[in-house]
Amino acid sequence: MPDPTPVPAGSPRGEIAAAVDLGSNSFHMIVAELSPAGELRVIDRMKHRVRLAAGLDDEGRLSAEAQQRAFDSLELMGQRLQNVRPDCVRAVATNTLRRARNTVPFLVRANRALGHRIDVISGHEEARLIYQGVGYDLPRQGRSLVVDIGGGSTEVIIGEGGEPLALDSLYMGCVSFSMRYFPDGRITREAMKRAETAARLELQPVKRQYRRLGWTRAVGSSGTIRAIDAVLRNTGLSPEGITPRGLSRLRKLMVDVGRIDKLALEGLSETRRPVLPGGVAILRAVIEALKVERMTASNRALREGVILDLVGRRSEKDARSVTVERLALRFGLDRAHAARVRRTAQELFDLVAAPWGLDGDSSLRRMLGWAADLHELGLAVSHAGYHKHGAYLLQHGDLGGFSTADQEVLAALVLSHRGRLDPERIGALYRGPLDPILRAAVLLRLAYRIHRSRALRQPVVRVAEVGPTTVTLLFGAHFFDDHPLTRAELTEEAAVLQKVGLKLTVVEAGPEATPPAGPSAPPAR
């Protein structure tokens, strides 16, 4: 049945969008229509039990068998997505691909199988997207506790209205716990106790904050929680659904049965059975630690959040822009100066994009703008080496809306905006194609150099000539008479760029010269 979900005002109408969720246990895809009434109507779903987490060996590498299961699933999903516009598709990967040591080569083949780029997202970002997906079904009034038990991680969120107040991703999942504590398929009282104790230890650092914030309703998402809810209701163990008493009865029943393969519970599917013990242990620990009296199960999850976030990116509700604005406010950045740097960097990007092979990469242009907004982030730590501090904060911080690859791009650009321009250092931060990031870093460096004096009036600068490995900047007549330090800065930069195979030339227009056609950086207001 189609299930309508409201989307943000200003969203595109009548288009088809899709989200793919590469979970640790299952891969999911939804295809939805953005209706003229402003609703998200799911028109197709696809789910494959891939058991990716089960394919991690002792060294953290994905087995060939697990990878092949993933590629087979992604190829089928890619066929379904052939008629969906590429900019209306987003695919995300979660805990197992955050942990795997061979994620990069896996993603090369996975991207090709799906036909779309797959973003590995942080646990914090996963929690935010889960809340966004589940939250659209929740009342706007009162606080909600949302719990999602995945194959490799458990996300816990408290939010009010559309805003998450606390987000955490914990290293415990139904697949990993079932493999660790019930490896031989036996369900004993001692094994359940060990699993529940481990889960309570994971919850220990966050439970005080969550109890202090409080909530008016508790909601569980993900297949594990829905399966537990169905078992409790269908077996009569807890007709009202997920409660502490019902979970205790289910735990006792499982221990009495004694083996996973002997569990024959109404509402429990054949594919969900192997991970039920780990899921029950985690959910019991959550219920106990957070003092939850009753939890309802939601049909929404990460994939709905992904598609709603994609809609937001196409309207004026891009979570990444909100994150950048909050960081700038939190760290007291000079917003006017950053805006001047951003303007110049992006205008240079537009002028060199075609010769430098960057045309069509609107995402890199946006990343360049956000890096300009945040290039002085590290000043909050120290002026000495502040570009290094800023890069560290961007690489390791919880940045809502950004994938881990996005954060690597931001970190690489901020790290490279001053000091030495080192391709190896960029490559150590960002594991994707290096040349586009290197060239974007050059544009940020030029904008930084041009505005280093922090003059309020923006200089008129144009690109007079540009080639695959050359660029000539043209400044207004007599500009360098009034700004000799800027000339020195750009002369120094030319020497830096020469080492990476780029030739920078800086010239002044003659007093009677006609400015070349093309956009220029306008004076700041």
Image (tube, rainbow, N blue to C red):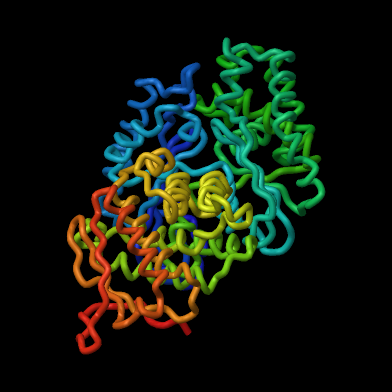
Q: Is residue 170 shown to the viewer in this render?
A: yes
The residue under the point 36% across, 53% down is 89
Q: Residue furthest bottom?
A: 512
Residue 108 x %, y %? 31, 36
The residue under the point 43% across, 41% down is 429
Q: Is residue 30 shown to the viewer in this render?
A: no
> In which image quadrant can residue 20 be found?
top left
- Pick the front one: 66 or 371: 371
445 to 124, vertically: above or below: below
Residue 497 x %, y %? 30, 53
- Pick the front one: 420 or 252: 420
32 left or right, relative to 253: left
Residue 188 x %, y %? 70, 13
The residue under the point 48% across, 36% down is 23
How many numbered marks appear?
0
The residue under the point 45% across, 52% down is 410
Residue 257 x %, y %? 66, 14
- Pick the front one: 84 or 427: 427
